[in-house]
Image (cartoon, rainbow, N blue to C red):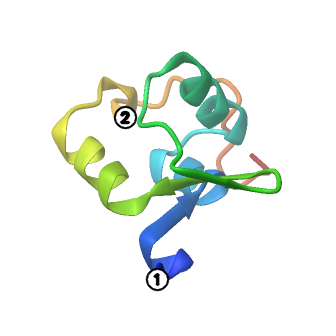
């Protein structure tokens, strides 16, 4: 059985990890620029934490200096 907090990450936490807005995380999801969620509970998408960690370590020019115009440091995302 899965421990949801240990095994999965939601879009809000993923946005914080990526230093991007929630809207950008969902745009990346829709366009295939990141791993796809493994589950959806009601309206909450869940990504496999290990897969996301591997993806972050492997490649991603997405994380070079923040170019997300929707991201506001210290504000709502």
Q: Residue at x 56, y 30 (%)?
A: 29
- Left/right placement of residue 59 relative to residue 21 reads left
- Left/right placement of residue 41 relative to residue 7 reads right
Q: Residue at x 47, y 45 (%)?
A: 18
Residue 65 at x, y percent in the picture: 39, 30
Work out which residue is located at the far front of the displayed protein and give it: 1
Along the line of sight, which residue is nearer the eye, 40 or 30?
A: 40
Work out which residue is located at the far left of the displayed protein and give it: 58
**Residue bearing mark 1:** 1
Is disc 1 placed on a helix, strand or loop? loop
Q: Residue at x 60, y 36 (%)?
A: 25
Residue 2 at x, y percent in the picture: 47, 78
Is disc 2 placed on a helix, strand or loop? helix
Label 1 and label 2: CA atoms lie apart by: 32 Å
**Residue bearing mark 2:** 63
Circle 2 residues within 10 Å: few <14, some 14–19, many ≥20: few
Q: Nearer the viewer, mark 1 or mark 2?
A: 1
Circle 1 residues within 10 Å: few <14, some 14–19, many ≥20: few
In the image, residue 58 above or below residue 62? below
């Amino acid at each position: 059985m899965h421990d949801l907090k240990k095994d999965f990450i939601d879009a809000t936490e993923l946005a914080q990890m990526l230093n991007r807005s929630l809207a950008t995380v969902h745009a990346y999801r829709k366009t295939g620029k990141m791993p796809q969620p493994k589950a959806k509970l009601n309206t909450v998408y869940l990504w496999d934490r290990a897969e996301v960690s591997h993806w972050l370590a492997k490649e991603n020019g997405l994380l070079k200096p923040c170019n997300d115009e929707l991201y506001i440091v210290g504000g709502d995302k």
